[in-house]
Amino acid sequence: MRKNENKRIFSNLIWRFAERSGAQFVAFIVSIVLARMLSPDIYGTVALINVFTSILQVFVDSGLGNALIQKKDADDVDFSTVFYVNLLFCGALYTILFVCAPLIAKFYHDMSLTALTRVVGITLIVSGIKNIQQAYVSRNMMFRKFFFSTLGGTIAAAVVGISMAWAGYGAWALVAQQVINVSIDTIILWITVKWRPQRAFSMERLKGLFSYGWKLLMSSLIDIVYKNSRQLVIGKLYSSSDLAYYNKGRQFPNYVITNINSAIDSVLFPVMAKAQDNRQNVRQMTRKSIKVSAYIMAPLMMGLAFTADSVVRLLLTDKWMECVPYLRIFCITFMFWPIHTANLNAIKAMGRSDLFLKLEILKKCVGVILLFSTMWFGPMAMAYSMLVSSITSQIINSWPNRKLLGYSYVEQMKDVLPSILLSVVMGMVVWCISVTGLPVLPVFIMQVLFGAVIYIAGSAIFRLEAYLYLKRLLSSFVNK
């Protein structure tokens, strides 16, 4: 029984990873093409709008999506109730954004942002429709459905975005790309997932779901406002080009973390929620998640950090070289994100959304102090403050699990240290290749090949537990 469950989890993890990897690969290629076609100023303009839409996007979920996944006996009445509430709420959010669009444009001293903001805001309404379908897929472990919807939306958006950029539409190409992506994604998901809202609504059920979900909503809201505060400050105090370099440096490692972290997060949370009454099982899943995700993330992030010059020069051209320092900082920052995810999923799965909210408030208080301490010294100082904040946050996130699961931060660090040390050694070797004086393309190819060989060979020689586990699991999956 346990063996079948592991295979089911791994199968869903593979589908989720394939979905995220496929979509992010297409998005990555498109971002390279668009970065070559559009100037950093245009990227900075759209980034200013996304600060506000990203914050409002948190309300689309309202924490109720996670509440549906966590609730043991959620049925069609629960799903239908949340669906209608989401539609009403998203309509209200879009109305607010539509009315406030001129104020946003005035804040940035660029009135062209008014129309752009109103069009991007359409994604809020569409996401509200998609949200419940996503919760249904996650709860029932049907992650194969995500593969087709996400990939379809990403490819359609890629065609539209590149075509409009080629035709000279500038910022509108990036805006259209966002709207088309979420719209096609939602349409495909609606067709492939058979759940439909019923004529049912229960205020009592809504109150129960909201009592759990509102704390996650506040946690997410605090988190997203904090994350976007740096972009807001850079866009206001510095130039749109500074914001573009900051965002582009964050974008590359973010592509990687989105693939792996989202796959682990979306699969692990519903599995943990079902095992919430068994403390030992949740502990084992948390520990395994941290070890495996760190084993995968550490070499990718360290490899990207040490090859940053080659990557940017090869893919984006020299006009984007100013984003290299940001890229390296964010690689180190994101390397530890799976540790955050595993710890927080364990807390959510055990029904402690109250504790989740308290942790979020504490972390963001520390982060805001760091932000205000560095915002006057330039975007680079703000990026470093993000790194310090991330390290502090992972300690805070892991602290409750010392008692909840008997799994302390020191134990967690011992579990991930072998992967990190091996990744640093690998990174130092591939960096040495960059000073050979060879052309950038051969250097990059050599760096990737040498890095992969060193890391895999080192894993086998030192018999890292995560390497052996993945090897057995992959062998079992292939044989099946």
Image (tube, rainbow, N blue to C red):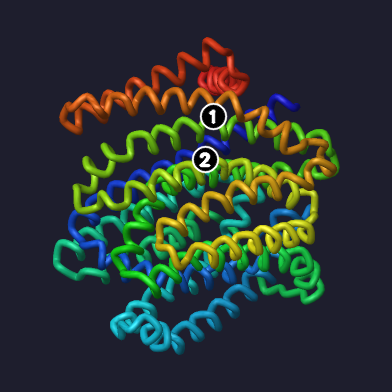
Mark 1, residue position: 420
The amino acid beneath tag 1 is: Ile
**Image spot of residue 307 (x, y percent):** 33, 35
**Image spot of residue 291 (x, y percent):** 62, 30
Q: Which quarter shows the C terminus?
A: top right
Where disc 2 sits, the SS reads helix
Q: Which of pointers 2 and 1 lies earlier in the amino acid sequence?
A: 2
Q: Which quarter shows the N terminus?
A: top right
Separation of residues labelled 2 and 1 (CA atoms): 9 Å
User: How many residues crowd around disc 2 within 10 Å: few (fewer than 14), some, or many (20 or more)?
Assistant: many
The correct choice, above or below, for 307 with respect to 355 in the image is: above
Side of 458 relative to 339 (left or right): left
Count of numbered marks: 2
Q: Nearer the viewer, residue 41 or 280?
A: 41
- Confirm or deny contact between disc 2 and disc 1 (CB under 8 A): yes
Where disc 1 sits, the SS reads helix
Mark 2, residue position: 335
Q: Is any atom of residue 73 visible in this view?
A: no
Q: Nearer the viewer, residue 66 or 462?
A: 462
Q: Nearer the viewer, residue 144 or 32?
A: 32
Q: Residue at x 28, y 82 (%)?
A: 112
